[in-house]
Image (cartoon, rainbow, N blue to C red):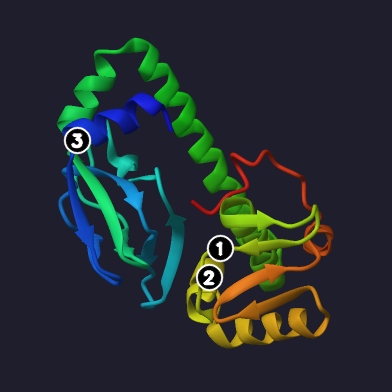
Amino acid sequence: MPQDIAILCQTKGTIFKLEKGATIFQEGERAEHIFLIKSGSVQVSKETESGRELTIRICGKDCLIGESLMFCKFTSHSTTAKALEASEIYSIHNDLLESFIQDHPTLMVDYLKWIQTENIKNQSRLRDLVLHGKKGALFSTLIRLANTYGKFSSVNEVFISIALTNTEIANLCATSREMINRMLNDLRKDKIIKIDRGYITILDLNYLKQEIDCENCPLAVCRID
């Protein structure tokens, strides 16, 4: 994200605190503000027609949310955002941010480059969910979590520093919790991962990459935020 946008949110925006589970915006609500995460983590999700929740992003510090509707004729949120933990969020009105970007041509170019990267990231994740089956969806999700929230102890071993329930992982993979339970248990038995109180450590990252024919996309693309 362009640094000038973050600075504007911090200097001109309103900051508010959220408890775990609090909603920032809901699908269908009027979209008038952009949000920058100061601390904590936020889940952005969409409910399918069948009532199943699909998690689109898990966002942390310095991530923008709600930005997809900027310079757009649509005025309602297409997703729901809620805090996964106690969080602090900056809120800034769309009009203020849009006029600031329009007044700074260089920033407009940087913004367009960033949005294009976000589009490529979303297309890449959708490809993995659709083309690689349930196992591939889980493996690619674990790789993206590692790239976004990972603390590497070696090239092949990484601790994911955000705790997730099996239901939350299932929502990221567009599959059932029961299926995720089985696949995670298989990975634990094979010593590919270990799990402690919701925190996952990947013990063999190369195995996950090989199983899905990982293309080693740039880290800016292979992320979950």
Please name which of the two marks, 2 or 3, marks the residue nearer to the observer. Answer: 3
At x 53%, y 34%, the residue is 117
How far apart in space, not on screen, are marks 3 and 1 (Cα)? 32 Å
Q: Which mark is residue 94?
A: 3
Q: Quadrant of residue 43?
A: bottom left
Q: Which mark is residue 174?
A: 2
| Mark 2 neighbour class, 10 Å CA radius: few under 14, some 14 to 19, many 20 or more | some
Please name the amino acid that badge 2 sits on: Ala
How many tags in the picture? 3
Counting residues from the start of the chain, the first of labels 2 and 1 encountered is: 1
- Picture layout, residue 145 above or below residue 53: above
Residue 47, x across and y down, in percent = 36, 69
Residue 131, x across and y down, in percent = 68, 60
**SS class of the residue under badge 2?**
loop
68 relative position to 182: left or right:
left
- Picture layout, residue 56 above or below residue 109: below
Please name which of the two marks, 2 or 1, marks the residue nearer to the observer. Answer: 1
- Picture layout, residue 60 above or below residue 93: below
| Marks 2 and 3 close (CB-CB < 8 Å) | no
At x 70%, y 81%, the residue is 183
193 relative position to 66: left or right:
right
Please name the amino acid that badge 1 sits on: Ser
**SS class of the residue under badge 3?**
helix
190 relative position to 23: left or right:
right
| Marks 2 and 1 close (CB-CB < 8 Å) | no
Q: Quadrant of residue 78?
A: bottom left
Residue 216, x across and y down, in percent = 75, 44
Q: Which residue is mark 1?
A: 161
Counting residues from the start of the chain, the first of labels 3 and 1 encountered is: 3
Q: Quadrant of residue 23?
A: bottom left
